[in-house]
Amino acid sequence: MDNANVDDKKESVVFDDYCIDLLKEVGHICTGNATVALSQVIKEKIDLRIPDLKLVDIDQIAKTISSSQEVLVGVSIHLLGNMSGNVVLMFPEKSAYSLIDCISQYPSELGSATEYGVSSLKEIGNIVISAYLATLSTFTKTIILFSTPNLVCGTLDTIFNIAFAKMAGPDNKVLLIDTFFSIPEKNIDGSFFLVFDPVAVKKIIADSRPSGENGN
């Protein structure tokens, strides 16, 4: 990604090269650790795409990623404290049920997950997202608190509207980190989205910057 910046009437947020490089490196390591956690749960190899970073209008997130109207199943967690934002682990509906079957002795029918299946998806989301945030916390030297996982279903627009409703606002820019992964042996595809308040992210990076390094 080229230099990330935004001209906002209220506040201008600019990430210098140091911030961008750090975010990319941390995002890659965090996502790698998160998918390792998922791989250990289902005992299958996971192919991972390098995470991408964008600074976008929050109401344009879904359009930035895809215009697909397929039904998706996601696990959403709201971040609390200084690192405000949201994390969503998302699967196409068929992949979500295949994932449940990987860890359950009770096969699920498409469109009718059992209580056990819903609980399993929430727990998978909790394990994967916790692994990501634990790594992020170590790198940023920041305690990251988060809510209990919430299961969300619908199109991409619907899920994002539910998951990121608390961050919505006029001219509200957010830092979007997204990556996609697949489990070839099980025909499972998934995606991982993190949305952060860019002002909070920049402050945390500045606080963790090595002495002698000055940002823009």
Image (cartoon, rainbow, N blue to C red):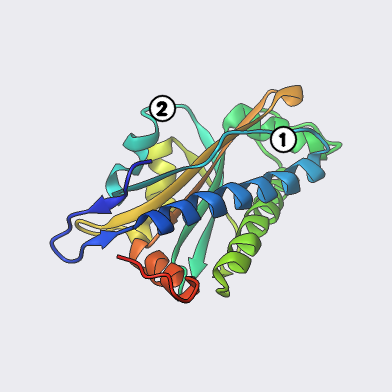
Tell me the crowding category of disc 2: few under 14, some 14 to 19, or many 20 or more residues within 10 angstroms, Cα based.
few
Q: CA gap, disc 1 to disc 2? A: 21 Å
**Mark 1 residue element:** helix
Q: In which quarter of the image is the N terminus?
A: top left
The single residue placed furthest to the front in the displayed view is 212
Q: Quadrant of the C terminus?
A: bottom left
Please tell me which of labels 1 and 2 falls first in the chain: 2
Q: Which residue is label 2 attached to?
A: 69
The residue located at (32%, 47%) in the rendering is 3
Tell me the crowding category of disc 1: few under 14, some 14 to 19, or many 20 or more residues within 10 angstroms, Cα based.
many
Q: Is residue 147 something that shows in the picture? A: no
| Amino acid type indicated by mark 1 | Leu
Q: Is residue 7 left or right of residue 48?
A: left
Q: In this view, does 41 lie to the left or right of 54?
A: right
Instruction: Give residue 156's position: percent from left, percent from top.
Output: 42, 37
Q: In this view, does 43 lie to the left or right of 148?
A: right
The residue located at (40%, 42%) in the rendering is 158
Residue closer to the observer: 111 or 44 = 44
Instruction: Give residue 214's position: percent from left, percent from top.
Output: 37, 70
